[in-house]
């Protein structure tokens, strides 16, 4: 078992297997709310949120090991960012923040939120209400992730491709949700297929990000013991 978790591919395979099981439960029991990928506060939601928060824990352990070894986090702030990002996404998933962001923003900034939403609607936007609020941060994070993926690849950080795939799957999931929440598609024929694709990409994306963090943690722990 000890050697199993030292192998990043075994770690990746373990969580991908659980991912597939969660998706299969939806396919086998589509009438059961507890397994439904499009519902909230159920098994897929708790599983995905917990996995993202687990990624936060792994990232923070990496931060601790780096600081203990180097005495500084200079040039290593990516792990702090990743911890914050996965923590927010995990809490967002479990707490359904994105589902209610429009209401929250109207309560916080009032008419400015109403004006913002009406403006993008006038421009032709007709999809999920949370995306206009999240798209800016996602673009910024994508640029940052791309920078570090390239840097880590040049520095020969192991399995950095997992981070690239994981974030790419998240972006594809967002693109599909944009499509499947349009009025002429949402709850229409074929909508369930869009839901399965979008949720599956999101679930797999979190697993690849976790596997990358796990592989780096294993490498850091090995290096720390040898020091």
Image (spheres, rainbow, N blue to C red):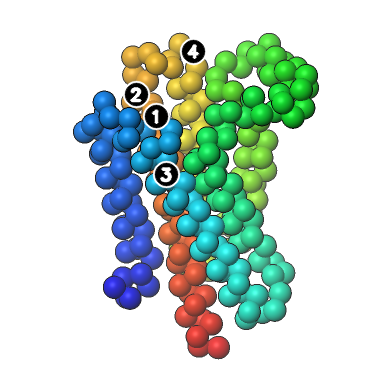
| Kind of element beneath mark 1 | loop
Crowding near pointer 3: few (<14 within 10 Å), some, many (20+)? Answer: some
Q: Depth check: 130 or 222 in front? A: 130
Q: CA distance from mark 4 to mark 3?
A: 28 Å
Q: Quadrant of the C terminus?
A: bottom right
The answer to whether mark 2 and mark 1 are in CB contact below 8 A is yes
Furthest residue toward bottom: 227
Work out whether mark 2 precedes mark 4 in sequence or the reverse, and give the earlier one: 4
Q: CA distance from mark 1 to mark 3?
A: 13 Å
Which disc, if any, is residue 46?
3
| Kind of element beneath mark 2 | helix
Which disc, if any, is residue 38?
1
| Kind of element beneath mark 3 | helix
In which quadrant of the rendered view does residue 113 lie? top right
Read off the residue under disc 4. 183
Work out whether mark 2 precedes mark 1 in sequence or the reverse, and give the earlier one: 1
Q: Residue at x 32, y 75 (%)?
A: 3
Which label sits in the foreground, 1 or 4?
1
């Amino acid at each position: 078992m000890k050697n199993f978790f030292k192998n990043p591919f075994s770690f990746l395979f373990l969580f991908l297997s659980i991912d597939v099981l969660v998706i299969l439960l939806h396919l086998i029991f589509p009438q059961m709310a507890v397994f439904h990928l499009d519902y909230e506060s159920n098994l897929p939601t708790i599983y995905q949120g917990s996995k993202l928060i687990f990624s936060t824990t792994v990232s923070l352990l990496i931060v601790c090991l780096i600081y203990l070894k180097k005495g500084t986090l200079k040039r290593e702030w990516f792990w702090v960012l990743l911890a914050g990002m996965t923590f927010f996404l995990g809490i967002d998933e479990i707490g359904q923040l994105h589902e209610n962001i429009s209401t929250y923003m109207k309560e916080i900034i009032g008419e400015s939120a109403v004006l913002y939403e009406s403006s993008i609607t006038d421009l032709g936007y007709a999809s999920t209400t949370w995306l206009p609020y999240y798209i800016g941060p996602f673009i910024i994070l994508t640029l940052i992730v791309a920078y570090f993926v390239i840097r880590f690849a040049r520095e020969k950080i192991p399995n950095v491709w997992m981070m690239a795939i994981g974030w790419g799957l998240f972006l594809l999931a967002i693109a599909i949700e944009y499509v499947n929440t349009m009025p002429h598609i949402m709850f229409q024929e074929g909508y369930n297929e869009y839901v399965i694709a979008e949720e599956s990409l999101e679930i797999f994306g979190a697993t690849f990000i976790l596997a990358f963090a796990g592989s780096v943690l294993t490498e850091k722990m090995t290096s720390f013991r040898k020091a």
